[in-house]
Amino acid sequence: MTASHTPRARFGGERGHRAAVGRGIVCMLGGCLLLTVNDTIMKLLTEHYTIGQAIFGRGVLALVFLAGWVMLAGGASTLRVYDYRGVIGRGAILVCGTYMFITGLSLLPLSTAIAVSFTGPLVTALLAVPILRERIGPRRGLAILVGFCGVVVMVRPSGDVVQWAILLPLGATVTGAFRDLLTRHLAARESSLAILVYSTAIVSLGGLASLPFGWAPWRLEDLPALLGAGATLAGAHYLQIEAFRCAPASLVAPYRYSSLVWAGLFGFLVWHDLPDAAMLLGTALVVAAGLYLWRLGAR
C-alpha cells in the first residue's frame, strides 16, 4: 500500500464507523418510539381486558411477526438452543417483570411508569456487587443514591394507592436487571433471535395462565390494537438488537431516554396527563444518575 492510499483508507474506515454508529442511534431511537407506542396500546387494552389476557393477546400476535423474521433469518435452525434451563429461567423472570410493569402501567400515567423503569442502570449496578463481585466506588455509589432519591421524590410516600403503584414498575426493573445479567450469560451461545422467540412464547403462556381467573370476551374492534401491540413489540426488539449490533452500548444506550419524550407526548394526547413538579424533579434525578453511570461505564 502506498502512502497516498493510507489517508483514504483511514478516512473510509472512519466514515464506515460513523455510519454504523449513526445506524445504531437511529435504530435505538426507532426502537424506543415503538416500545412507547406498545406501552400506550397496552395501557388502552387493560381498560377492557385483564392484565394476563392483554399480555397473551400481544404475545401471540408478536410471535406471528417473529415467525416471519425466523423464516427470513434461515428457518427453524436459527432457534436452536443449548442452555434450555437458562432460556426458560429468563422467560420466567420476564413473566414476573411483564405482569408487574403492565399492572403498574394500568394504574399510573404512562410517563410515570416509563420514568420509573429507567432505574434499570441503578439496579444493575447494585446487583453487580453480589453477583459479579464488582466494586461500586464513591462516584458510582453517589449516583445510585441520587437516582433512588429521585424515585422517593416520585413516590412521595403517602396512603395514595396510585403513588404506591410506582413500586410495580420499580419491581419490574429489578427483574429486568436479573434478566439482563442472565442474557449476558446466554448470549455467548444462544442467538438473539432464539432468545427473543422463546422468551416471547413463555411470556404468552404466562398470560394464558390467567385464563381460569376470568377473561373478558374478545372484541373484534380491538383486533387492530392487538395487531399493533404485537407488531410494535417485535419491531422494537429487532431495532434495539440491531442498535447494539451496529454501535457500542455506551454510545447508543443513553438514547433510550428518548422514550420519556414520547411517553410525555402520548400521555398528554391520549389521557391529557401532565406531570407535576415532583414527578419532573424525580425523573430528572433518575435520568441524571443513569446517564452518569453510563458515562462511568464507558470510561
Image (cartoon, grey):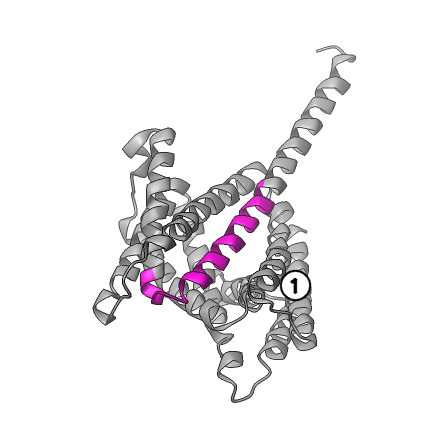
**In this rendering, position of residue 258 left or right of residue 207:** right
Pinpoint residue 101: horizontal percent, then vertical percent.
44, 66
Name the residue located 57 percent from the left edge and 41 percent from the top edge: 27
Quadrant of the image containing the N terminus: top right
Tell me, yes or no, whether the highlighted magenta stretch contains residue 36: yes
Residue 68, quarter of the rendered image: top left
Pinpoint residue 31: horizontal percent, then vertical percent.
54, 46
Pinpoint residue 82: horizontal percent, then vertical percent.
29, 43
Q: Secondary structure at mark 1?
A: helix
The three-letter amino acid code for the residue at tag 1 is: Val
Specify the farthest residue to the front. 221
Magenta region, main secondary structure? helix
Pinpoint residue 80: horizontal percent, then vertical percent.
29, 38
Residue annotated with mark 1: 287
Residue 191, visible in the rendered structure = no
- Magenta-drawn segment: 27-53
Residue 37, visible in the rendered structure = yes
Name the residue located 60 percent from the left edge and 79 percent from the top edge: 152
Specify the farthest residue to the top. 2
| Closer to the camera in the image, 144 or 214 | 214
Examine the rendered structure and indicate whether residue 297 appears above or below residue 120: above
**In this rendering, position of residue 80 left or right of residue 31:** left
| Closer to the camera in the image, 153 or 62 | 62
Examine the rendered structure and indicate whether residue 261 appears above or below residue 272: above
